[in-house]
Amino acid sequence: MQRHVFFLSDGTGITAETLGNSLLTQFEGLEFRKVTLPFIATPEKARATVDYINHVGDSDGARPLVFSTTTNDAARAVLRECKGLFIDLFDTYIHTLEQELGVPSTQAQGRAHGLADGSRYNARIDAMNYAMEHDDGQSTRDLSKAELILIAPSRCGKTPTTLYLALQHGIFATNFPLLEEDLEKPRLPTALQGLEDRLFGLTSDPERLAQVRNERRPGSRYASLAQCAFELRQAEQLYRRYNVPYVNSANMSIEEIAATVMQEKALRH
Amino acid sequence: MQRHVFFLSDGTGITAETLGNSLLTQFEGLEFRKVTLPFIATPEKARATVDYINHVGDSDGARPLVFSTTTNDAARAVLRECKGLFIDLFDTYIHTLEQELGVPSTQAQGRAHGLADGSRYNARIDAMNYAMEHDDGQSTRDLSKAELILIAPSRCGKTPTTLYLALQHGIFATNFPLLEEDLEKPRLPTALQGLEDRLFGLTSDPERLAQVRNERRPGSRYASLAQCAFELRQAEQLYRRYNVPYVNSANMSIEEIAATVMQEKALRH
C-alpha cells in the first residue's frame, strides 16, 4: 500500500513541505509519495486540487496526508473538504496568534517566500554574488567585506556552507582554502592576516575526508588517508594557535554546520 | 514595546523558523526581535533556555512568542513551562499523525535537517558542485548531464535559481547565458542544440533589468533601458521559436522562480 502526502500552498509550498517533512521524519519505515502543489490561490484551483487528492486517495486505498499553508480563507475553505487528513498551519495557529497579538491577520498570500521584504531579498542576492566571486580564494579583493570567512583543507564543506549562508541568510560569507604550504608550518595565509575575527574553521575525520577526496581524484596522494590525516591535524593546530573557533563537519549536514557557525559567531541578522 | 520571538529546536531550528516566520508574515506593522536557539537536546539546556526566555519576557514587559520543534519529550516538557506563548509543532500534530499512521513516532532528534538521508544529501552536494562548475556557460562539458538548463540574458536570476535548486532540491541544474550574438538572430547557442527538452527560459521587465544591471555597471550600454528591452524581446522570441517554457522573474523571489520551474518541468525528486 502506498500513501500520498500532499503539500499545498498559495505560495511556493516551502513552508508546507518543511512542516510536513519534519513531522514525517518521526515515522520510520513508512514509504510516502510526496507531491507539492504550489500557487493554489483561487477557490477554482482549490476545487481542482481537492478532486485530484480525492482521486489519488481512492486509487491508493489509503487516506492521503495533506499539509497546507494556504492563507486565503476562500481557497482554504475548499481545500479543507478534501478526503485527506488535513493539517493546516493557519487553521491551527492563526487564531491563537491573533488573540495574543491583539490584531487580525492580513491573509496576505505567498508572503513567506516571496519578495515581501525587498531589502532583505537584495541582501541575499548580493551575498550570493559575493560568495560566488570569492569562492575558494579565487579573489582576495574585498575579503575584508566578509562577515565570515570559512577556512579548512580542501573538501571539508566550505563551499556549500558558504553558499547556503549567503542564499538563505544573506550573510556576507566567503571561504579560503588552507593549502599544504599553509598547513606545514602551520601559518595563517597572508591574505587572512588581520581578519582573524571573521574566521571559522572546519575540520573532518581522516577516513571521511579521504572518502570524499577519492570520489574526485581516486588513488591520488591528495586523497590518501595519510595526507588527509596530516592536513586535518595541522589545520586543527592552526585553529588553536590563532584562536579560530572550529567544528568537525564529518557527520554534519550543511544546515547543521551553518546553524553552528551562525550561533558561534553571532551572525543571525 | 518590543516583543521577542524565539525559535527553539534540538536540531538546526530551521523548521521552527519556517513555521514561525510564515505565521508572522500574516501580521503587518508589528516589530519582533527574533532569536534562534538551536541544538537544545537535553533537559538541562532546556532549563537554561526557559530561564533566558523568562528573563527576556520580564525585561520586555511583553510575553515572548515561542515556536518550538523539539522532538525530545524530556526537553520539550521543560520548554513548555516557559512564560512565553508556546507553539510546538510536535505537541500539536504528532498525536494526530500517530493515530492516522497507526505507529508511534520515534522522537529522533535533528532529523529534519541532518544527515539522516545520506544518499539524498550526497546528491545535493554533487548537484551543487555541478552547478558551480557549469555556472554561466563556464564549461559545456557534461552539459547533457543537466536535468535542467536555465537560459536568459544576463542578470535575470539564472545563477541564484540554479544554486537554490541544486542546494535545496539536489536537482542537477545549470544555466547558460544568451549573448548578444545569440539574441540578434535569435538562435539557440550551439552548445544547447539537442538539449531543448532541458531548457527553461527567464525573462524580466526592461526597467527592472536595467536597474539590476546599473548596480553592476552604472551608465553602461549593457545597463541601458534600450539594450535591456532589446535583449528581453529577442529572448522571448527565441523561447517561443524553440518552444522553451519561460517565466517573467521581475517580481519573483528565487524560491518562487524555483517552485515554478520545478512544477513546469516536473523536476521534484
Image (tube, coloured by chain):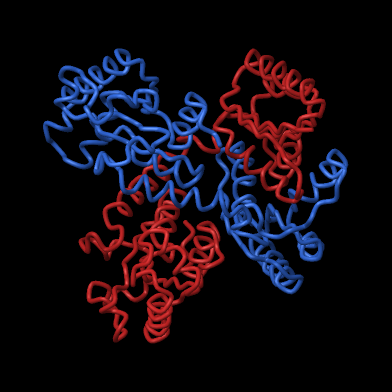
Chain colours: A blue, B red
Question: In the displayed structure, does residue A182 sit left or right of residue A194?
Answer: left
Who is closer to the viewer here, B76 or A54? B76
Compared to B219, does B76 lie above or below?
Answer: above
Quarter of the picture holding the N terminus of chain B: top right
Instruction: Tell me if B100 is positioned left or right of B152 in this view.
Output: right
Relative height, residue B113 to residue B173 (above, below): above
Q: Nearer the viewer, residue A95 or B142?
A: A95
Residue B257 x/y as whole percent: 51, 63
Q: Residue at x 69, y 41 (%)?
A: B20
Percent coordinates x, y for residue A70 in the rendering: 72, 58
- Asked if residue B247 can be seen in this view, the reply is no
Taking depth in this image into account, of B94 and B89 the one nearest to the observer is B89
Where residue A165 appears, as percent x and y from the top left, is: 45, 40
Q: How many marks?
A: 0
Residue A150, x across and y down, in percent: 35, 32
Residue A79 in view, yes or no: yes
- Name the residue: 56% across, 48% down: A120
Q: Nearer the viewer, residue A51 or B138?
A: B138
Q: Residue drawn 33% across and 72% down?
A: B221
B3 sits left or right of B174 in the view: right
The answer to which quarter of the image holds residue A118 is bottom right
